[in-house]
């Protein structure tokens, strides 16, 4: 997937998205619960990987139900996927009913006001009911949702799915998972005619009680590990490479980068990459992250600047002007990069910038 040097295409960094790995991951996750439908969460421009390429690839693989965060994302997805079922997770903004209906989008209704506004229109299109089982973020409290069982407003609102969101699915032993699963089982029993959805990426790998009728993987589709601490069952999807612009020698005691935050302990060789935080690579990885040059892990030296990163390539004999450094790829998966930056792989993915030369492979 390395290809030509990205600098020859007008920018010094390339982001490669492996669509075959993406669809393989969707099938891997679907196989965890073959009795359920496997949807796909493609919010935030498909986790930074590009909705216009990702959504059709998933559709070709057999995915038929998609989730986005905002109405605008739903509109974009509908233009790409004219026949898909598309749910909008962040609910129904006041006065947006007509826009939802015009694009055949299904809001995930999270409070009584949203439910009543959606139900007030003639022949309301389908929608989902969001029940809060522990996140305290969006959704109806469990007791309030249970009180709606048998209420005609559910039918008037066209509710076809009841759903909730797991708080700690990536920590299988967390007691909160069992409590949420039990609460959601009560909800499902109260609405026996509706499909149910609880499992996100990590929830798909939990016990069967979390899986229900519709899986909602997102992060794991793009190579994130749904089971931290265990071998990642999914394949890497993104690869980020940058051109080495210059290599220089520095003597012991010399510094590099803004505010001289790094000082050479001995003679060192430094390489400057054509990539920075304006491209979405986190500044918080300064002096803690790594890149690979010729397979050698080279630490980031000093503060990451807007358009440039400096590496200590003393131990990488292949480092040269015009060469390539890998910032995401091989052993530097998105979870590893996230930890080095003091954050999570989700933030790394969704922060991927628009300036890269983007390449999609199947």
Image (cartoon, grey):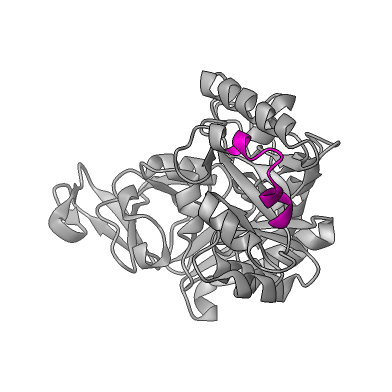
Residue 87 position, x and y percent, is 66, 58
Magenta segment, which residues?
A: 145-157
**Observer-nearest residue: 11 or 336?**
336
Would residue 207 be counted in the magenta stretch? no
Residue 205 position, x and y percent, is 68, 31
User: In which image quadrant can residue 305 be found?
Assistant: bottom left
**Observer-nearest residue: 190 or 220?**
190
Residue 294 position, x and y percent, is 52, 51
Would residue 154 be counted in the magenta stretch? yes
**Observer-nearest residue: 353 or 33?**
33
Q: Is residue 185 visible?
A: yes
Q: Is residue 52 visible?
A: no
Labels in figure, total? 0
> Vertical placement of 39 versus 60: above or below?
above
Q: Quadrant of the N terminus?
A: bottom right
**Observer-nearest residue: 55 or 289?**
55
- 287 sits left or right of 325 in the view: left
Q: Going 35% across and 54% down the picture, which residue do you hit?
A: 311
> Vertical placement of 279 versus 203: above or below?
below
Q: Main secondary structure of the magenta part?
A: helix
Q: Quadrant of the C terminus?
A: bottom right
Q: Going 51% across and 55% down the picture, which residue do you hit?
A: 113
Q: Going 86% across and 36% down the picture, which residue do you hit?
A: 35
Residue 59 position, x and y percent, is 79, 61
> Vertical placement of 212 versus 107: above or below?
above
């Amino acid at each position: 997937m390395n290809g030509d040097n990205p600098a020859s295409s007008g920018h010094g960094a390339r982001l490669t998205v492996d669509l075959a790995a993406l669809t393989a991951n969707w099938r891997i996750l679907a196989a965890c619960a073959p009795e359920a439908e496997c949807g796909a969460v493609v919010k935030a421009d498909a986790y930074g990987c590009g909705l216009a390429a990702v959504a059709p690839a998933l559709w070709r693989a057999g995915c038929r139900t998609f989730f986005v965060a905002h109405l605008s994302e739903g509109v974009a997805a509908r233009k790409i996927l004219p026949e898909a079922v598309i749910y909008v997770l962040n609910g129904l903004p006041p006065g947006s009913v007509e826009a939802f209906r015009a694009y055949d989008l299904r809001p995930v209704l999270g409070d009584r006001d949203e439910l009543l506004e959606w139900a007030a229109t003639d022949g309301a299109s389908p929608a989902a009911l969001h029940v809060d089982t522990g996140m305290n973020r969006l959704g109806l409290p469990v007791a309030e949702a249970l009180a709606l069982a048998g209420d005609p407003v559910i039918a008037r609102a066209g509710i076809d799915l009841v759903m909730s969101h797991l708080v700690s699915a990536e920590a299988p032993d967390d007691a909160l998972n069992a409590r949420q699963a039990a609460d959601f089982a009560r909800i499902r029993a109260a609405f026996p005619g509706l499909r149910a959805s609880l499992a996100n990426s990590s929830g798909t790998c939990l016990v069967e009680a979390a899986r229900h009728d519709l899986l909602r993987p997102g992060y794991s589709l793009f190579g994130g590990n749904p089971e931290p601490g265990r071998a990642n069952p999914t394949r890497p999807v993104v690869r980020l490479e940058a051109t080495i612009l210059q290599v220089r020698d520095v003597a012991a005691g010399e510094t590099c980068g803004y505010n001289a935050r790094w000082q050479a302990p001995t003679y060192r060789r430094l390489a400057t990459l054509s990539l920075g935080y304006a491209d979405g690579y986190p500044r918080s990885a300064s002096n803690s992250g790594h890149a690979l040059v010729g397979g050698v892990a080279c630490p980031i030296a000093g503060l990451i600047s807007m358009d440039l990163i400096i590496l200590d390539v003393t131990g990488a004999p292949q480092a040269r002007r015009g060469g390539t450094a890998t910032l995401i790829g091989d052993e530097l998966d998105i979870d590893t990069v996230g930890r080095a930056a003091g954050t999570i792989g989700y933030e790394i993915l969704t922060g991927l910038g628009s300036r890269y030369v983007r390449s999609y492979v199947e």
